[in-house]
Image (cartoon, rainbow, N blue to C red):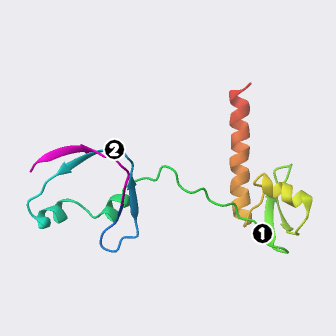
């Protein structure tokens, strides 16, 4: 088999095979190492389809998850100033509740609020132990 190297002179957009919903962008300037194969069967057994390749890749810039926000009259939980977890009913146009939401202090379940509280308390303890 022969190996050859190419530098892309323009962006390439390609689609996955076998019904894969993946579209791939390879930017201009990328070096590609190409291996010539004699038989298509040899290629198919040696190399996985593009969808399989992406299963083993880690996304570098994943879409940020959107913060959950309760709807009008829906129950939610917050962490209080004292570090307790309390439930509230969400009312539209309540300035205090909007401020809690804006700083991320709004949770769908009591368990999530407790988990967040524990992480915040641990972070505060670590901060103070490192900055005394």
Q: Residue at x 8, y 60 (%)?
A: 38
Q: Number of marks in the image?
A: 2
Q: Residue at x 69, y 60 (%)?
A: 67
Q: CA distance from mark 1 to mark 2?
A: 45 Å
Element type where label 1 sits in the image: loop
Where does the magenta region start and end?
1-13
Check disc 2 and report the residue beneath it. Answer: 30
Q: Earlier in the sequence, mark 1 or mark 2?
A: 2
Q: Say if 93 sits above or below 120 in the image.
A: below
Q: Is residue 30 left or right of residue 79?
A: left
Check disc 1 and report the residue beneath it. Answer: 70
Q: Say if 34 sits above or below 17 in the image.
A: above
Q: Residue at x 32, y 45 (%)?
A: 9
Task: Pinpoint residue 49: horizontal percent, then vertical percent.
Answer: 28, 64
Q: Does residue 79 appear in the picture of this structure?
A: no
Q: Is residue 46 left or right of residue 74?
A: left
Quadrant placement of the C terminus:
top right
Task: Pinpoint residue 8: horizontal percent, then vertical percent.
Answer: 31, 46
Q: Magenta span has 94?
A: no
Q: Residue at x 25, y 62 (%)?
A: 48
Crowd class of label 1 (few under 14; some 14 to 19; many from 20; radius 10 Å) = some
Element type where label 2 sits in the image: loop
Which labelled disc corresponds to residue 33? none
Image quarter of residue 68: bottom right
């Amino acid at each position: 088999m022969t190996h050859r190297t190419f530098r892309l002179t323009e962006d390439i957009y390609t689609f996955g095979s076998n019904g894969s919903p993946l579209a791939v962008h390879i930017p201009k300037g990328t070096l590609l190492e190409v291996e010539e194969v004699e038989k298509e069967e040899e290629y198919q057994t040696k190399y996985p389809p593009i969808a399989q390749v992406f299963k083993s890749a880690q996304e570098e810039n994943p879409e940020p998850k959107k913060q959950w926000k309760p709807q009008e009259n829906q129950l939610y939980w917050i962490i209080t100033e004292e570090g307790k977890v309390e439930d509230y009913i969400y009312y539209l146009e309540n300035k205090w509740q909007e401020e809690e939401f804006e700083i991320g202090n709004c949770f769908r379940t009591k368990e999530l609020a407790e988990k967040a509280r524990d992480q915040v308390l641990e972070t505060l303890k670590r901060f103070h132990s490192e900055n005394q």
